[in-house]
Image (cartoon, rainbow, N blue to C red):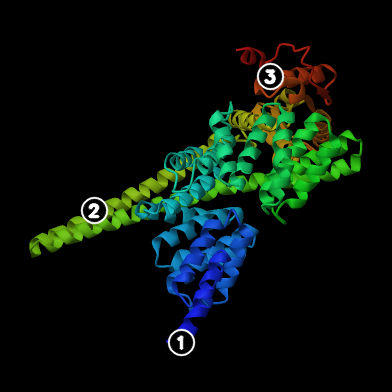
Amino acid sequence: MKKALRHAFPWLATILLMVCMGLRATPDEAGNPSSAEAILSRADDIKIVDFQGFGRLLDDLATHDAKLAPADHWKLRFLQGWRYTWVGDYENGRKALEEVADEATDNVLRFRAMATLINLLGVGHRYQEAFVRLNQLQDLMPSIRDRKARFQGLGEASQLLSSAGQYEQAAAYAREMMENPAPGRTICVGAQHLLRAEREANRLKTLDPMYLRAMEVCDTTGNDVFADTMRADIAAFHLRQGRPAEAVKILTDSRDRLRALNYPALLTEYDATLAQAYLKLGDVANARRFALSAVAGSIKDEFTDPQRTGYSVLYEVERRLGNAPAALAYHEKYMEADKGYLNDVSARSLAFQIVDQQLLARKAEVDALNKQNEILRLTGALDRKEVETGRLYIVVLLASLGAIGWLLLWLRRSQLRFMKLARRDGLTGICNREHFVEQAQRVLAYGARSDRGACLILFDLDHFKAVNDTFGHAVGDEVLKRGVDVCRRALHACDVFGRLGGEEFAVLLPDCSPAQARARAEQLRLSIAATSATQALPTLAVTASFGIAGTMQCGFELHRLLVVADAALYRAKRAGRNCVFMGDTGDIPDSPYLSEARG
């Protein structure tokens, strides 16, 4: 009896110590296998509100991983993957979460691992893999009765869909989170996802008081990350509405607390918005400080929105201070970051479309197999004569399906070919008038939203009618093609180049000032004048006259830009041709675009 008590006392003392230390005992220390499950549940509960304590619990359990039951091992592996993801160790996080998602026997744990893996793959720009996992998660979702796990899955699905521009589905998932929060949860997380989706979709015209109430709920329940993310969105909304002082107040009041959360991605978002707000307020010192912080805190070797915003603000600060070399250097970095970010946005949308098409193709294959199996089952029940007849029918059916499939493929290829032909000028290969207008309006709409100017260049070849009349239309066509080739080599990939008709062409230069547009137009003019018109007639010189209009004077309406640029082009013609004129909105003569613009 005494010997039993001597053995029992250390066990009881260990249990008491485990309780006092917040359930930090390991299975070996406690002598009770069920304590591992309790420690894992405790770690799962505090992983956001007490990240340091969460990490200590995992480290204690990891030393005894080999002794854990399979269910506890997979739970530990999942939490380790979550921890790696939180601190930015994406490679180890991905490996751990993929093991759980693919090998664990518990569907709820697999579902949670998939949800976390979706977040990780999205952050790591592995979008196609993320959408594949999202489809697996959506397939598993109807069988998940655990409300906490379902809540997490809805949140990750909402974020990924929103990043790919699927705002309707993202908002639907966020509203479901708000209407059916998991036990212990509130509207906090769902409201944050809904606010982000509405803002990124540019549908946030007024600030619903519901978001402010949800942010207060986040604060009171210890969900600091979601509260601060909502503050970032609300600050960005105020900045877009022309209230930079309110944006600064919201972010500076919570920035110091955010630094303690060890969440660098959100901190760089704060700093980028603060840099923009201070720049609008004229405080270049703080604008530079926060822009540098946003750039420094961005993920290495990746292009993010805070990074490109930081470079944009640094360029503007140096430009205002008259430091031209530094401004130019920052502008080059901004252009690189902006191109990378836009490519990343396109990659998300493309990945969604690819995975969606793959799913449709697999579904079609399954449906085809099901139908084929049904045909085989029915033919098996017939006698020999009916079997022979059925086989003949199947051959005919398959031949018909093959013919239909070939016809559909041919029609699809024809459709794609016709779409390409409809968008391109048949002679020069550049945008035709309709496609140029469509592309230019899209670029101008983006420039209006992002407050980045653009310039429109109109030009046509001088005395082109005389070339046609003297040398014939074949030479005229060669002159047009050579002129277009010269311009193509001088234009950037983001410029929109189109033929409006005859010998008249247009170039829309995004993110371009009037001075830069004039320099670009001079470059085009000199290039055209320095190039022989054709190989057959090397002495035939061709020149062009140019007119320029900028959004700084004319706004972002394409019709207005066309009218002003056309007026400048006419002035260049009257001034003797082979020159460049800037548009003047105060003196717009009659032009082919005037009636259209007024209408």
In the picture of the structure, the residue carrying the numbered disc 2 is 397
Q: Is residue 506 visible?
A: yes
In the picture of the structure, the residue carrying the numbered disc 3 is 560
Residue farthest to the front, as pictured:
2
Which of discs 3 and 2 lies nearer the camera? The answer is: 3
Quarter of the image where one finds residue 269: top right
Q: Which mark is residue 82?
A: none
Quarter of the image where one finds residue 362: bottom left
Taking the image as shown, residue 342 lies to the left or right of residue 546, namely: left
N-terminal of the two: label 3 or label 1?
A: 1
Dot 2 falls on a residue whose secondary structure is: helix
- What number of labels is visible? 3
N-terminal of the two: label 1 or label 2?
A: 1
Q: Residues within 10 Å of mark 1 (few under 14, many from 20)?
A: few
N-terminal of the two: label 3 or label 2?
A: 2
Q: Amino acid at mark 3?
A: Arg
Residue 190 drawn at (x, y percent): 50, 42
Residue under the image location 15 percent in, 58 percent down: 378
Q: Amino acid at mark 2?
A: Leu
In the picture of the structure, the residue carrying the numbered disc 1 is 2
On-image quarter of the N terminus: bottom left
Which of discs 1 and 2 lies nearer the camera? The answer is: 1
Q: CA distance from mark 1 to mark 2?
A: 86 Å
Residue under the image location 32 percent in, 56 percent down: 366
